[in-house]
Amino acid sequence: QKEVEQNSGPLSVPEGAIASLNCTYSDRGSQSFFWYRQYSGKSPELIMFIYSNGDKEDGRFTAQLNKASQYVSLLIRDSQPSDSATYLCAVHPRAGGTSYGKLTFGQGTILTVHP
Amino acid sequence: DTEVTQTPKHLVMGMTNKKSLKCEQHMGHRAMYWYKQKAKKPPELMFVYSYEKLSINESVPSRFSPECPNSSLLNLHLHALQPEDSALYLCASSQDLGTGVTTDTQYFGPGTRLTVL
C-alpha cells in the first residue's frame, strides 16, 4: 500500500467549474498536510497547508482534512486555465520521530482546465 | 519573503566532471533539504540538514556530497555522476525541525536542471 495516494487523473474540468483533488494517507499519526502546485518544468509551489480537521479556505482554494478517514482534499473553485498543473499532496509525520522533516508525497494529479 | 534561490538554473556535465549546486535562503530557516525529481514523478528526498548538521541521508550514493557551510547556504557537490542522475534538483527550507512545530512548511527553490552526458 502506498503511503500517500492521490486520485490518478488526469482530471479535466471546464473553466469556471470546481476541481476536486483527493488524497489519502496511511500513517494515522501524520500531523501536517500540504498541497503543492507544480507547473511543467518548474518547482513545487505551496498552495495550502492544513493540520486541523475541517475546512481551510484561501481565496479560490479550500483544503479539507478528515483525520478519522485519513483523507485530505483540495477544492479549486472557479477553475481557470492558469490552474492547469500537477497538484502534489504531501504529508508530514508527527514531531519528534526519526522521520520528522520527511515529507511524503503522493504521485500527483494532473489537472487540465479547458476554456 | 519565502524565497529560496538556486544556482545554476541549468547544468550539463560529463561523467568525469566535478560540479556543485548551490542553494541560499534568507528566511532564518534552520532546516534545509535536497530533493531529486525525475520527470512525471514526485520529489524524492536526498538529504536534510537541521541547524547545519546532517540529520537525514536517504542512502544517497557517495557521488553526491552535501555541505552546509552556514544556516543560509546549502551545497551539493557532484562527482562521477551517471546519466541516470539527470534530473531536476530541488532545494527547500523550513522554519524549524524537531521542535514540535506542527506546520513545518517547506518552501522550494526553482531547481537546477542537471544533465549528465
Image: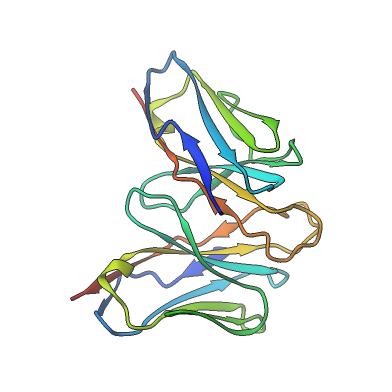
Query: Measured from the top left, where is residue B21 in percent x and y?
Result: 51, 29
Which residue, as the protein is rendered here, is positioned at the far top?
B16
Residue A69 visible at all = yes
Apparent side of residue B39 relative to residue B80 in the rendered image (left or right): left
- State whether residue B66 is above or below residue B101: above
- State whether residue A44 is above or below residue B53: below
Query: Measured from the top left, where is residue B12 in percent x and y?
Result: 35, 25
Residue located 44% across and 32% down the image: B85
User: Considering the image in quadrants, where does the C terminus of chain A appear?
Assistant: bottom left
Residue A1 visible at all = no
Apparent side of residue B11 relative to residue B66 in the rendered image (left or right): left
Residue located 34% across and 70% down the image: A9
Query: Measured from the top left, where is residue A110 in percent x and y?
Result: 34, 65
User: Considering the image in quadrants, where does the N terminus of chain A appear?
Assistant: bottom right
Query: Measured from the top left, where is residue A83 in percent x and y?
Result: 33, 69
- Observer-nearest of A23 and B31: B31
- State whether residue B82 is above or below residue B107: above
Residue located 74% across and 36% down the image: B52
